Image (spheres, helix red, strand yellow):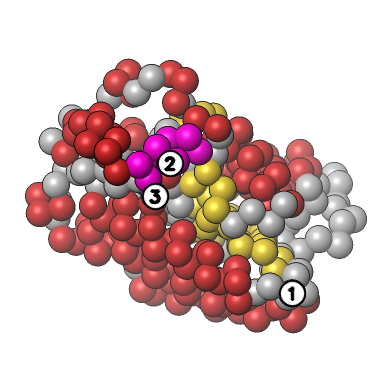
Amino acid sequence: MRKVCSTVQQSISNKGPALVTGASSGIGAVFAKKLAGRGHGLILVARRRDRLESLAGELSERFGVEAEVVAADLADPADMERLERLIRERTDLEFLVNNAGFGTAGRFSNVALSKNLDMLRVHCEATVRLSHAALPGMVAAKRGAIVNVSSVAGIIRVPGSAMYCSTKAFLNAFSETLSMELQETGVRVQALCPGFTYTEFHDSPEFADNFDRGDVPKFLWLSADRVVDMSLEALKRDQVICVTGLKYRLLVAVSTIRWLRPLLRRLTRKRER
């Protein structure tokens, strides 16, 4: 673990630090930027140390906040235990963003079992373990927030993404129930459900032959900046399930209409191949 801190300007805010997983790019990196801009120190977690160190240095210099770098794979039990210990020791943690995740393309039976199990570990087990480690300190301080980055795929079923939809549905249910338990504690919980977002998510080899951004209408794409802004605004309103944007809220509403479900399945059938 490496710590980076600006020598030019120190934050004078009394805000506690924010831990962000999957912080090396995309939505995680934007959360780190926005939270640093609000005066939160940072604990940046991802597998790519070089990306984390570059981001930590940039945000420390720009916002005058302390930034710690933790290179970790959340599918690795040893790395998970190390990160849990770090969180339990940092009783001042004020913000936890469980953003780390990945997708696969293809029928469940055609995807390697090891990848399916890794997705369970990264999306579900890591979120549960890190939240469990962070909550005692947040509840004691009577402040804090946990954002679990889910997806509209946790609400709308998409053929070819059986594990992805299932793990994201778990995050929604977990977030809603946890929020109920934490009422009157000062700790807020949110499941952020973005739709298609311009990030590196679809650049992995998994999607090389199974996904073409051009097949998705441009009006359905959102920037990571916009997604994070909507999340933070919704958090102020104590909105637990945050579906990003009117278009996706309408799509979610349509998905509940039984006679329209076959149309949605046809529109998403390419994901099965």
Nearer-the-camera pick, 179 or 7: 179
- Tell me how far mark 2 sits from mark 1, CA to CA: 30 Å
Q: Which residues, given as a range, are shown in magenta?
A: 248-257
Q: Quadrant of residue 88?
A: bottom right
- Residue 24 seen in the figure: no
| Residue type highlighted by circle 1 | Glu
Residue type marked 2: Val
Instruction: Write the residue at 24% across / 64% down.
Output: 117
Residue 180 in view, yes or no? yes
The image quadrant that residue 44 belongs to is bottom right
Q: Is residue 179 magenta?
A: no
Label 2 crowding class (10 Å Cα cut-off): few <14, some 14-19, many 20+? some
As helix, strand or loop, the secondary structure at mark 2 comes to: helix
Give the alpha-carbon distance from disc 2 to disc 3, as whole Å: 7 Å
Q: Which residue is mark 1?
A: 184
**Placement of 215 over or under 261, stated as above or below:** above
What residue would you read off at disc 3?
155
Q: Residue at x 34, y 66 (%)?
A: 121
Q: Earlier in the sequence, mark 2 or mark 1?
A: 1
Secondary structure character of the magenta stretch overall = helix
Q: Residue at x 25, y 31 (%)?
A: 263
Residue under circle 2? 252
Tell me the kind of residue under disc 3.
Answer: Ile
Q: Is residue 14 left or right of residue 78?
A: right
Residue 251 on the magenta span: yes
> Where's the N terminus, which quadrant?
bottom right
